Structures are given as structure tokens and as C-alpha cells.
């Protein structure tokens, strides 16, 4: 039931006039009259007595009046609660990120953001590719810094930030014959596939099929540092990104791939979230943080 009709009826009775109620609510008198007729039709009851001197409730209307007031109070309480939740949402940003992004980018981003948004709390949820995308689609995150995936980005908006080159991770004793590592060099190698979801970035390097390179793929559930440590101990080879291995102190050889390949990092958010939360409620406040990310994007 449309509570506007009940609100109009109660106001008309309080004012004693449909005309006065219509003026106060911004309706025409005929429009308000149609609303009252529709309300009586919905209930199947006569609620108003109409006369030249104004309007009043019928005995049936009088009997239902307490319930009308109760329903209107509940409706206002619902609106107030929703508004309070919107305000709370506007003061909280739920950010998702890969561990490498959380380590290399997020601290500087949050330092800038905190200066511009001291009244907005930020939570950071670190996870892998499928986990973060699942949380975006489930509205458990407002936005996330992730690599682009055409399939997983369905229903999301994506703002590109920068390409993060993928690199070969080889044992430290490997003697390169060139400045880069050919993808065909993985043929026959014990290949350590990083944590769940990373294969979406790696598999296209092998021509959409691992069989074309014939590496002995070992799927793992290890974090980035563990993968690098495994390679250091000559347990296999792998592919990670420059951002992942940046500042890692392991005795491994890191070489660009031939042909070159990158993962495309950016900010993903659900389309329905564009009108809500701190992310869109105060776009100016994101300017400094976005500038920081823009600088990252422009680095060679």
C-alpha cells in the first residue's frame, strides 16, 4: 500500500478539507480526490464523508485511523533508518586489494586519502583474484584495485591505472643468454602456478593453452613470497609481476618475458555503488589519492 495515500487522507481529515491538504502536499484537488478514491477501492471500504463544509472520517475510517497512524510512524522510522545507514555508508570505504598492491600502493594512497577524508574510515581486505571479485559482486566491497578480467568484470566499472609487466622467476644460478626470457623456455620445466586466480593472467601467455608450452604445471595455494622462495630453492620456475617481486630479497633471477605480457591493474567497483559510499559521495576527496595512483600509472 502506498503510504502517500494514507498520509494524504490523515492530513485531509486534520485540515478538514481536501483542497487544503492538496495545496499543502503539492497536488491538485482532483489528483488528491483520485488518490482517496483509489485508497477506498484498495480497502473496499468507505473512509471519508464528503460535504460542502469539508471532509471527515466515516465510522469505518475512525476504526482504522489508529492503524493508519501506526503504519505512517513505521514508514517514517524506516526512512530514517535507511538515511542513517546511507550516512554511515558514506563514512566507510571498503577497499579490496592484492597483497602486492596493499604492500606497494595502499599505504601511500591511504595517507593522502586520510588528509582529505578525516571523517571516513577505510577497511582494507587483502585477497586473491576470485576472492576479491566475488566480494565486489556480493557488495561486500565498495571498490578494489585488481587486474582486469573480462569475465569477472561483468556488471562492474573499471578504471585503468597502469600495466604491471609479468616477469619470469628463475633460480639464481640461471645463466641468461639474453636480457629477457622466451616463453618457450618454460617447456618441460616444473612450473609453479601462483595462488588461485593468477592463472587468468598467466595462461594467455602460453597461447590460451599450457599444452603449447608443455610445462609441468603445479597448481599451488602459496602466497607470492612462498613461490619466490620455492624457486630460490630450485623447486621450479614461475611467473609473477614486477609489482609482486618489487623489494623482495631472494636469490632468484627476474627477467622480462619474450614476448612481453602485462596484467592490467585498475579500480573496479559495482555500477550500483557509483551513487553510494565514500567513493562517490565525496569525489573531490579522492582527488589526492587518485593523483597518487595516476603518478604510479605514468611511471615507465
Image (cartoon, rainbow, N blue to C red):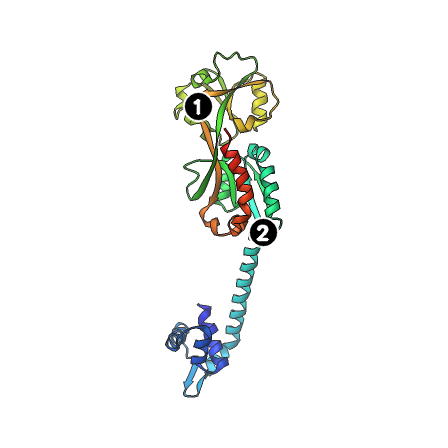
User: From what the image shows, is residue 85 above or below residue 44?
Assistant: above
Find residue 206 and report its image quarter: top left
Answer with mark 1 or mark 2, whichever residue precedes in sequence. 2
Viewed as shown, does residue 212 lie left or right of 219?
left
Q: Is residue 192 visible in this depiction of the protein?
A: no
Q: Position of residue 289 (x, y in %)?
A: 55, 42
Give the mark count.
Answer: 2
Q: Is residue 69 visible in this depiction of the protein?
A: yes
User: From what the image shows, is residue 270 above or below residue 216?
Assistant: below
Q: Residues within 10 Å of mark 2 (few under 14, many from 20)?
A: some
Q: Position of residue 47 (x, y in %)?
A: 44, 79
Residue picked out by circle 1: 260
CB atoms of marks 1 and 2 within 8 Å: no
User: From what the image shows, is residue 208 above or below residue 143?
Assistant: above
| Residue 189, numbered circle | none
Q: Cα distance, mark 1 to mark 2?
A: 42 Å
Residues 300 and 53: in front is 300
User: From what the image shows, is residue 211 above or below residue 123?
Assistant: above
Secondary-structure class at tag 1: loop
Q: Residue at x 55, y 52 (%)?
A: 90
Q: Residue at x 53, y 13 (%)?
A: 174
| Residue 91, numbered circle | 2
Q: Residues within 10 Å of mark 1 (few under 14, many from 20)?
A: some
Q: Position of residue 9 (x, y in %)?
A: 46, 76
Residues 258 and 207: in front is 258
Q: Quadrant of the N terminus?
A: bottom left
Secondary-structure class at tag 2: loop
Q: Position of residue 300 (x, y in %)?
A: 50, 28
Amino acid at each position: 500500500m502506498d503510504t502517500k495515500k494514507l498520509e494524504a487522507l490523515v492530513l485531509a481529515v486534520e485540515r478538514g478539507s481536501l483542497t487544503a491538504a492538496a495545496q499543502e502536499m503539492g497536488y491538485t484537488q482532483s489528483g488528491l480526490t483520485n488518490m482517496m478514491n483509489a485508497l477506498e477501492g484498495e480497502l473496499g471500504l468507505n473512509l471519508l464523508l464528503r460535504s460542502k463544509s469539508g471532509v471527515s472520517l466515516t465510522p469505518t475510517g475512525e476504526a482504522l485511523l489508529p492503524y493508519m497512524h501506526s503504519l505512517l510512524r513505521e514508514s517514517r522510522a524506516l526512512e530514517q533508518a535507511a538515511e542513517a545507514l546511507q550516512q554511515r555508508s558514506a563514512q566507510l570505504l571498503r577497499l579490496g586489494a592484492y597483497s602486492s598492491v596493499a604492500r606497494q600502493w595502499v599505504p601511500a594512497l591511504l595517507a593522502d586519502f586520510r588528509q582529505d577524508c578525516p571523517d571516513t574510515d577505510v577497511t582494507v581486505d587483502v585477497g586473491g583474484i576470485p576472492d576479491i571479485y566475488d566480494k565486489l559482486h556480493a557488495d561486500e566491497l565498495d571498490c578494489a584495485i585488481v587486474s582486469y578480467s573480462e569475465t569477472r568484470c561483468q556488471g562492474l566499472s573499471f578504471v585503468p591505472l597502469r600495466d604491471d609487466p609479468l616477469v619470469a622467476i628463475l633460480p639464481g644460478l640461471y645463466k641468461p643468454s639474453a636480457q629477457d626470457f622466451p616463453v618457450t623456455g618454460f617447456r618441460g620445466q616444473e612450473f609453479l602456478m601462483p595462488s588461485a586466480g593468477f592463472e587468468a593472467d598467466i595462461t594467455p601467455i602460453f597461447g590460451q593453452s599450457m599444452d603449447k608450452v608443455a610445462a609441468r604445471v603445479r597448481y599451488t595455494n602459496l602466497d607470492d613470497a612462498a613461490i619466490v622462495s620455492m624457486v630460490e630453492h630450485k623447486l621450479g620456475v614461475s611467473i609473477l609481476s614486477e609489482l609482486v617481486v618489487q623489494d623482495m630479497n631472494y636469490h632468484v633471477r627476474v627477467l622480462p618475458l619474450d614476448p612481453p605480457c602485462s596484467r592490467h591493474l585498475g579500480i573496479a567497483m559495482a555500477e550500483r555503488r557509483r551513487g553510494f559510499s565514500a567513493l562517490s559521495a565525496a569525489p573531490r576527496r579522492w582527488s589526492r589519492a587518485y593523483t597518487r595512483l595516476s603518478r604510479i600509472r605514468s611511471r615507465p
